[in-house]
Image: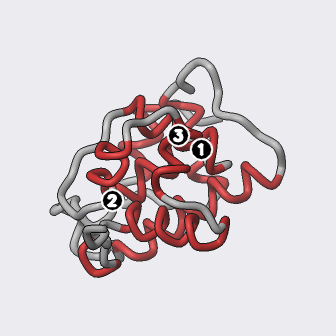
Amino acid sequence: MPARLQIKAEDCSPLGQFILQYLEEQGISMNRLAELAGVPQPRLRGACFKGTCPTPETFRKLSRVMGKHHLELYTLAYEGRMEYFPEDTDAISLDLLMRELFENARELGLTCPKVRPSKAKIHKALLELGFRAENEERVRNQFEVS
């Protein structure tokens, strides 16, 4: 029997590391996860590596099986790939904030809205979370926050 190709965690994106952890915790093989998700095993394996771009459909199929929102998996897949952040922004803090938002939504049994919220609603929610504008007057004029 030929040796099995093993995926090493250091070769994986954060999504791949999450998938490997899930496989270990569930005691299942990658072949089994691929079967459960309805994703070809080579596609699932490829989605684990750094620099790959899984399809939205792959995220949706995996999310159903893994009990995560597909946007959480998307965030993991693309973590660390954004090159521009404002100088005073801590990329790790942004990542932790996104994960916490999704975790809290899941714990509360919330689902994503069917219609994208308006910029004014998003702005109001961000202010309630503690975000602050560098130029309050410009933002107030742009979104007319009540």
Q: Which residue is mark 2?
A: 48
Residue at 33% across / 62% down in the picture? 79
Amino acid marked by disc 1: His
Identify the mark at residue 35; answer none if there is no mark. Answer: 3
Between disc 2 and disc 3, the foreground one is: 3
Identify the mark at residue 41; answer none if there is no mark. Answer: none
Q: Residues within 10 Å of mark 3 (few under 14, many from 20)?
A: few
Based on the displayed image, in which of its 4 quarters is residue 93 positioned?
bottom left
Based on the displayed image, in which of its 4 quarters is residue 130 positioned?
bottom right
Left or right of 84: which side holds 133? right
Between disc 2 and disc 3, whose residue precedes?
A: 3
Q: Is residue 130 visible?
A: no
Q: Residues within 10 Å of mark 1 (few under 14, many from 20)?
A: some
Between disc 2 and disc 1, whose residue precedes?
A: 2
Q: Position of residue 113 (x, y in %)?
A: 65, 27
Q: Which one is nearer the viewer's eye here, 56 or 35?
A: 35
Residue at 52% across / 60% down in the picture? 29
Does dot 1 land on a helix, a strand or a loop? Answer: loop
Identify the mark at residue 69; answer none if there is no mark. Answer: 1
Amino acid marked by disc 2: Cys
Q: Quadrant of the C terminus?
A: top right
Q: Position of residue 118 (x, y in %)?
A: 52, 25
Amino acid marked by disc 3: Glu
Q: Which one is nearer the viewer's eye here, 38 or 107?
A: 38
